[in-house]
Each structure stands twice: as C-alpha cells, then as structure tokens.
Image (cartoon, rainbow, N blue to C red):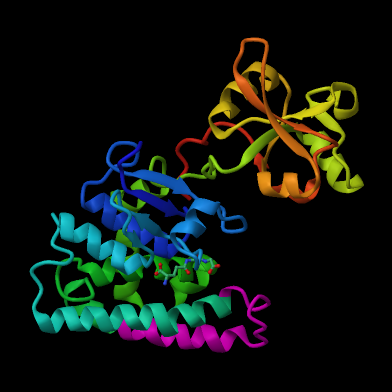
Amino acid sequence: MAGLPVLYSFRRCPYAIRARLGLRAAGLAPGVSLELREVDLACRPPELLAASAKGTVPVLVLPAGEVIDESLAILHWALQQRDPQGWLAGWSAERRAAGAALIEANDGPFKHHLDRCRYPERFGVTDPERHRTAALELLQAWNRRLEPGGWLLGSRPALADIAVLPFVRQFRGSDPERFDAEPGLAALRAWLARFLASAELAAVLAPPWGLRRSWRSPSWLYHLALERDWQRARAEGIYPWSTRGRRQAEVGFVHLCRAHQIAATRDRFYADAGPVRLLSLDPAALTAAGLELRDEPAPDGELFPHLHGGPLPLAAVRHHASDGPEPAGATA
Ligand SMILES: N[C@@H](CCC(=O)N[C@@H](CS)C(=O)NCC(=O)O)C(=O)O
C-alpha cells in the first residue's frame, strides 16, 4: 500500500469517527486509496509517534510526508478533495462562523463535561451530576438550533453536524434510557436517531473503516503464545517457552516472527491450538535486556528472527491481544 495516505485511527474514538466520516464522504476507501491503521491507545506504534509526537488519533499522513494530526483539519482536508454532500461548501460566511462556534463548544466545554460525567474516577470528579447537567444545557441549546430545519445550520447537514454528532452519540451511550427521557431534547433526539441509523455511521464502524484488530507495526517483533501459557507467565513472571510445547531452555532460543509472518505462523503451528495470544515486542527492549536477535532460516529457508541468550522478558512485551482474523460485521 505504498504511496497511499495513511490514517491512524481508533474505532470508537469520536474524533476518529468524524475524520473517517469525512474521508469516506470524500470517496477514499481503505485498502484502495487509503491505508487504515487501527491503533491501541494503550500502546501506540512507533510509526504513529514518529508522525505526531502527541500520540492522539486520528492522524493522517499524506504520501508526500505532510502530517495532519487534528481531526477537524483531516475533515477539512478530506472535504477539500471532494465534498459531494456540501458539508463544507455552499454555506454563507455567517453560517460557517456559527458552525465553527458550535464545534468549538463541542470540542471544548461539551467534551470536558462529557468526559467527567462518563469517567468521574479518571478525572477525580466527585460530582459527575454537575457535569451531566452542564453538558445537558449545551445539548438543550443545540436542540433549539435544530428545531427549525432538523440540522445545526439549517435544513441539510453541514460539517458542524458531522463534527459534533459522534460526541452526542457518546453522551447518549453512557445512559441511553435517561437520555431518551430528558425534557427539551426532542429535535436533538431525532437528529441523533437519524445519525445512529445512517449508512454513513454504520460504514465507519464496520470493516474496512472500523477495525477491532490493531495494526501490526513492522518495527515490532511478534511471538504467538498459547493463552494458558501467557496467563501463567503473567502470574509467575517468567515465560519459559520457545514455541508451542517446546521450552527455550531445550531449543536454545525463542521463536519470533515479523508482522508479515504472523498469519502463516499461526496457520502452520497454532491452527488447532485453541486460544492464542499475539505478543508485540520492542526489539530495543530485547537487546537492552542483554539478549541477541538473529535472523535464522527455517527448514524451508525463510528467515525468522530468533531471540538468543535467555527467555522472553515480559518487560519487552509492548502489547498483547487475542490473535485471530478481524471479526466481521458488528457495528456496535
Ligand atoms: N484534538 C484532537 C483530539 C484527539 C484525541 O484526543 N483523541 C483521543 C482518542 S478519542 C486520543 O488519542 N487520546 C489519547 C491521549 O490523549 O493520550 C483531534 O481533534 O484530533
């Protein structure tokens, strides 16, 4: 996929959702005209951090190297390429300014209160209700804007609707029954319901736009572990295996593979193994632990990385996830 724009994304992130909505509307398609890399925010791949040190998603890296690391800027870039639904084009300066103010209120105070009523512990908040009430006041103001035409700027969707809807979706998602019973939100509920039922949202939450499996960085090395061996290693602090059923002490090294070798390795050795976990390893942490990496040939001549000098150090495991094909379909 060399030469395509690369989008670092996170399926459920409202900022990434709005970027994907814009890119999709502009006619880009993952695997065809864009490479989509799903990121685990607990463990960002080095390529993302090299592109944008702040490490947030979404980030769009253009083929010439330009990096766009703010979701709104990605939306603007996308719609400047193509804007078939007139989300950006065709609005008066006054409405555009009103749209920009709505997005600012969303990304600023609304997001602030949303985070604090959804995750009070994370933000050290003792009164999440106060934040819910403040968020509701903004929603009621938006409801009044929606009453005349059904959309924030009038009778058709604009950039502001696309930019704000994923956050209102999150607000409702934290307590749908309560949200649905709130007074003063009828127009907003209808606006949100249209979005929730839309083909656009469904498309960006399902493959190929919305992935559940993280991208495998070519900068990392990988090891497949039986789930039960991995769980025991976590409990005991040592992972003694080289590969399925064979110990490092017996084999003399630990079998690893590169990103492009994972699927074939799983199919060849783990197809009937039951639950398997994919460990992502930082090569620098392996060598810093005094171990040696060598590329050595398998019986068919293909070179694989082998870890010599001791068992796999758990501290070098950057990420671990159940391994398997991308689950298809579900849009929740
Ligand atoms: N202003 C940024 C915000 C993006 C953002 O905060 N994304 C969240 C995920 S929903 C993130 O990457 N959080 C990780 C972090 O802040 O460390 C944008 O609009 O792109």
Residue furthest out toward the top: 300
Q: Camera-side residue: 51 or 125?
A: 51
Quadrant of residue 158 in the image? bottom left
Q: Residue at x 69, y 34 (%)?
A: 223
Up the image or down, 105 lies above or below 198; here it is below
- Residue 42's x, y, as percent? 62, 58
Residue 138: in magenta span: yes
Residue 112: in magenta span: no
The secondary structure that most of the magenta stretch takes on is helix
Up the image or down, 158 lies above or below 110; here it is above
- Total marks placed: 0
Magenta segment boundaries in residue numbering:
118-143
Q: Residue at x 34, y 46 (%)?
A: 203
Q: Residue at x 65, y 75 (%)?
A: 122
- Residue 234's x, y, as percent? 84, 46
Q: Is residue 194 left or right of residue 301?
A: left
- Residue 222's x, y, as percent? 65, 36
- Residue 320's x, y, as percent? 68, 45
Q: Camera-side residue: 180 or 83?
A: 83
Up the image or down, 23 lies above or below 163; here it is above
Quadrant of residue 52 in the image? bottom left
Up the image or down, 170 lies above or below 9; here it is below
Res 167 visible: yes
| Quadrant location of the N terminus in the rendered image | top left
Quadrant of residue 109 in the image? bottom left
Q: Is residue 64 left or right of residue 228?
A: left
Q: Residue at x 61, y 74 (%)?
A: 119
Res 319 visible: no
Q: Camera-side residue: 223 or 194?
A: 223
